[in-house]
């Protein structure tokens, strides 16, 4: 994305956005950023990020390096130097747009947010956590000091320590869940905004294609009538007919209009899926088509399913049954589908790195070769009985051993590298299915034969 393309994209968004290089140079900003600083965009062009913030240069470079190397959005904090001399603490969300390569620097999109009130709440929360941590430490010291003196008091201290530790863990978990929920809400708002901006011009183009095609056919019909009544055209006209290859033009122009119609219809389908997926912030129970939620989530991951020079194409096999509309929280279910599908794609990419798709035993059958040589995700839906439905998402990656599988739904448990996973995706998914929808979420896996996640929810969910 060039700075000019960034400005065209950022102009329709109200959030303060900056496009910076991996070294911290400001390549482009939008008006909300300039307003926050009390400057004009022209005054920011060419500056370094360290010139407009108070954080040390080393901290800024470390943050930009984290953004460059992470596939997920990286949360940070930047303190802006305003033109009037005051400072403004902002929460930043950084995502790499163009990874670093030997030929060019990384491009990083930073979204700023004046979170004075929220930051204050987080500060209070962190202070509370620190206080509780200190209290735990003090209680443990008291336990050691009074251990020999009074056994009964020792037991009470131990109980209190355990209770405080649990409270500390709950607060830490709540803090991380708040960040995760805000990320999902921001994603939903951005997706909905982009879908709206795309839909308007596409609808205009699609609505005029029919008329343009009709007008063109009328003109071509007029040309054909002219040729019938005036077969001997002047040399200039005959030369022009040969130059433009009129016969080919007449045949090809219909194909062109058909191709443009198919293309605009495809864009409309994508916009519809984006709008469906952007229901992430819906908080009310409502009846929805589960298949629409799954399909819209797959649309979000379409770029990761396609073949690259590093990974083969991931084939998605849908085995949908006829399902009734389900009363549920649609945005939260979309989040569950997204978490499980993201893990399946990550597992298949790990399998590709381990060479699972590169070699085939010559003694295997054709069906076995197809399975071994093609990473795939199978999505199956079915009606269990008049009250329940099930959604199964299975992959054919390396699978999960029992030791890992038993901890999958524990908070903060992850097998991914630092910066790639928080250990909250499946935990939050479990809470959504079990606590919010009174359903069930289970994982079945045999090492070497992939993994399957089975979601069971009642047709009429009651939180």
Image (spheres, rainbow, N blue to C red):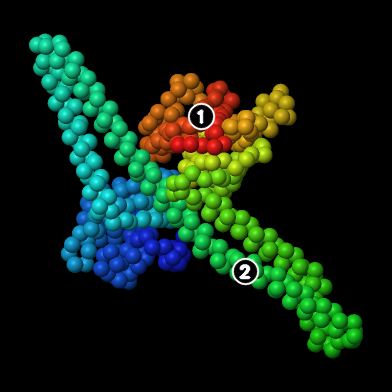
Identify the image quadrant of residue 220. Answer: bottom right
Do the residues under discs 2 and 1 have CB atoms within 8 angstroms? Answer: no
From the viewer's perspective, tell me whether residue 375 is left or right of residue 135.
right
In the depicted structure, whether residue 385 falls above or below residue 295:
above
Whether residue 101 is visible: no
In the depicted structure, whether residue 324 falls above or below residue 193:
above
Specify few, some or many for label 2: CA neighbours under 10 Å numbering under 14, 14-19, or 20 or more: some
Measured Cα–Cα span from mark 2 to mark 1: 46 Å
Callout 2: SS: helix
Q: Which residue is mark 2?
A: 205
Q: Which residue is mark 1?
A: 440
Q: Position of residue 429 (x, y in %)?
A: 46, 35
- Tag of residue 101: none
Foreground label between 2 and 1: 1
Residue shown at the point (83%, 87%) measured from the top left: 235
In the depicted structure, whether residue 47 falls above or below residue 285:
below
Residue shown at the point (64%, 66%) measured from the top left: 206
Whether residue 270 is visible: yes
Frontmost residue, 57 versus 124: 124
Q: Earlier in the sequence, mark 2 or mark 1?
A: 2
Residue shown at the point (59%, 32%) measured from the top left: 387
Identify the image quadrant of residue 20. Answer: bottom left
Residue shown at the point (64%, 39%) measured from the top left: 323
């Amino acid at each position: 994305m060039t700075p000019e393309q960034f400005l065209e994209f950022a102009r329709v968004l109200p959030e303060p956005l900056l496009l910076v290089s991996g070294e911290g140079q400001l390549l482009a900003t939008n008006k909300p950023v300039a307003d926050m600083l009390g400057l004009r965009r022209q005054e920011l062009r060419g500056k370094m990020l360290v010139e407009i913030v108070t954080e040390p240069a080393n901290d800024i470079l470390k943050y930009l390096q984290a953004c460059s190397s992470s596939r997920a959005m990286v949360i940070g904090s930047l303190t802006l130097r305003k033109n009037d001399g005051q400072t403004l603490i902002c929460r930043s969300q950084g995502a790499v747009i163009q990874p670093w390569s030997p030929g060019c620097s990384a491009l990083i999109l930073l979204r700023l947010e004046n979170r004075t009130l929220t930051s204050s709440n987080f500060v209070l929360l962190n202070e509370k956590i620190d206080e509780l941590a200190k209290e735990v430490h003090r209680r443990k010291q008291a336990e050691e000091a009074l251990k020999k003196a009074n056994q009964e008091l020792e037991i009470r201290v131990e109980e209190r320590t355990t209770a405080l530790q649990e409270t500390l863990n709950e607060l830490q978990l709540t803090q991380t869940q708040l960040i995760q929920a805000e990320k999902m809400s921001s994603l939903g708002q951005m997706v909905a905004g982009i879908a709206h901006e795309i839909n308007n011009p596409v609808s205009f183009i699609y609505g005029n294609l029919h008329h343009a095609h009709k007008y063109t056919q009328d003109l071509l019909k007029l040309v054909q009538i002219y040729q019938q009544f005036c077969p001997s055209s002047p040399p200039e006209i005959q030369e022009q007919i040969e130059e433009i290859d009129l016969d080919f033009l007449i045949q090809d122009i219909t194909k062109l209009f058909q191709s443009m119609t198919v293309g605009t219809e495809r864009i409309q389908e994508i916009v519809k899926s984006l709008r469906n997926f952007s229901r992430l912030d819906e908080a009310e129970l409502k009846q929805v088509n589960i298949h629409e939620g799954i399909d819209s989530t797959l649309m979000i991951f379409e770029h990761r399913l396609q073949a690259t020079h590093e990974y083969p194409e991931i084939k998605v096999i849908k085995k949908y049954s006829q399902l009734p509309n389900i009363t549920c929280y649609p945005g939260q279910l979309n989040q569950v589908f997204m978490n499980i599908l993201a893990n399946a794609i990550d597992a298949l990419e790990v399998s590709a790195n381990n060479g699972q798709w590169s070699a085939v035993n010559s003694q295997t059958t054709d069906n076995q070769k197809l399975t071994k040589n093609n990473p795939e995700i199978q999505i199956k839906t079915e009606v269990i009985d008049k009250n329940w439905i099930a959604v199964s998402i299975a992959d054919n990656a390396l699978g999960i051993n029992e030791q890992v599988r038993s901890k999958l739904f524990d908070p903060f448990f992850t097998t991914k590298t630092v910066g790639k996973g928080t250990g909250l995706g499946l935990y939050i998914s479990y809470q959504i299915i079990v606590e919010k929808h009174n359903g069930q979420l289970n994982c079945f896996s045999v090492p070497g034969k992939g993994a399957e996640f089975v979601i069971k929810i009642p047709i009429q969910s009651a939180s």
